[in-house]
Amino acid sequence: MSASTAPVLQVRDLVVEYEVHRSSSERVQAVRGVSFDVHAGEVVALVGESGSGKSTTAHAVVGLLPGGGRVVGGSVRLHDGELVGLGAKAWQQVRGARIGLVPQDPGIALNPVTRIGDQVAEVLRIHGRVRRAAAAQQAVEILRSVGLSDPEARARQYPHELSGGMRQRVLIGIALALEPALVIADEPTSALDVTVQRRVLDLLDDVTSRTGSAVLFITHDLAVAADRADRVVVMKDGEIVEQGLTAQVLGSPSHPYTKTLLAAAPQLTVRERVAPAPVPAGETPLLDVLSVSKTFRLPGHAGRTVQAVDDVSFSITRGAAFGLVGESGSGKSTVARLVLQLTAPDTGSVLLDGAPVADAAGRAVLRRRSQLVHQNPFASLDPRFTVAKIIDEPLRSHRVGNRARRRERVVELLDQVALGASYADRRPGELSGGQRQRVAIARALALEPDLLVLDEPTSALDVSVQAQILALLDRLRRERGLTYLFISHDLAVVRQVVDRVGVMHDGRLVEVGPTEDVFDDPQDPYTAELVGAIPGRRADLADLADLTPDALLERSTR
């Protein structure tokens, strides 16, 4: 950090309120008396759970509070200029040029009907930096700088034609296009795999060192904060509970809440996993994936195709958990769709208990005995339905039981996922992200399946809620004998929950083996690159990596 005397960003006694209902004058304080500085060339991480106020603080700084939200106290200064109270026209000169924002959700932030290159070029043209033709060429170079392959082709594509990780890199390119004095990165890597995450964060590091930009980094990932931030600010319930140098706050935390967050971080702690019971010799695996391949045509590319999955084979024994890891676009989610017969393989086959699932009868059995838990609990639940109706839906579809028995089953399932009957009449909008994912798991368990396919089930959750969901999945596996196909780009999470792991790269399975063997002694160079990119391994906090949660708590109270 090369901090100057005067900070780039100075926040003092910030108070933000939201109205509870439009028809009511009642208001709630989401941020209460928050103060911190960010200097040139410095990365300050705001960390905390969902609802802690960290994103509200960032949105207040950039003047993008949602409807019903307003700053009612305090000061936000960029260099010597006060930002609180700026009018719309003044903000147009600040956003993009002096403050760059990398939002969390690339699916919402990008215009679905505008080509990628035009969206990157727009920020250059709005601020009068270059003419239209030059903006188009500079947009291509910006896409190249954030690690997109074939940037000329990507510039002509629409957002839906890119993966989530690619879309996030586009947003980072837009935010950095004008080399602003302050970059606000709101969970910028939560949708990215570890190697792309490392490249993106390396890019942010490069910009701050080259231009002296200050970075306000909003994250629930303490390992990323440990690696990348000069200072950490810990928020809870709208207040700062602890702040200081990263090594000090995360190495020897003083506040109980910080200790709890650290104990829940999978990259910084090691948890003991309960191994499944030994499989009797000769027993048929529950799931066999045999040499499956899948090719897709690229829309608008005159017959060009991409090999999404190339001759992939693995098996999962009953009661075991098998993990598939790899970068965005490696083919792991396509494998999940092939397993569930949501997409038919071009070649190869899928067997459930030794029986093929490709014909109508096999698919009917598969639908009943396997279920999918989606990545995003905010998108996978119908907002119009009550929790009871969401969980009841598969029971009704398969005509299981009468109305009274199904209601009893819904309550049983809510108890199993530690919610309880009181949640039955709520709707998704009344639930937190972790509660929504519990509902999604309860729905998946409704038909008492043998196999759960979990596609990034914790990537949208903060670290403590993630730990709760992983503990729930571990308990359900032990109690119900469930079998898991666990797909994730978060290798630290995978290491906590699976017995065996397969590594995918460009559609191929490059390495398969027991989890500890693959992580501790990778044989394939690509696996070694993935493992080496897991955050939370830098020198200042390296000694935390081998601590159990209890040992971490004991260390932090010395």
Image (cartoon, rainbow, N blue to C red):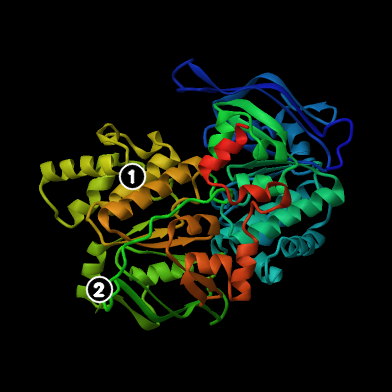
Q: Residue at x 80, y 44 (%)?
A: 180
Question: Disc 2 designates what residue?
Answer: 353
Q: In front here: 461 or 396?
A: 461
- Secondary structure, mark 1, is helix
In the displayed structure, does residue 32 sit left or right of residue 307? right
Question: Up-down: is 166 above or below 343?
Answer: above
Q: Which circle, 1 or 2, is nearer the viewer?
A: 2
Residue 186 in picture, x, y percent from top left: 63, 43
Residue 3 in picture, x, y percent from top left: 86, 38
Q: In front here: 46 or 79?
A: 46
Alpha-carbon distance for marks 1 and 2?
28 Å
In the displayed structure, does residue 336 sit left or right of residue 98? left
Residue 310 in picture, x, y percent from top left: 48, 81
**Would you say residue 115 is visible in this rendering?**
no
**Amino acid type indicated by mark 2:** Asp
- Secondary structure, mark 2, is loop
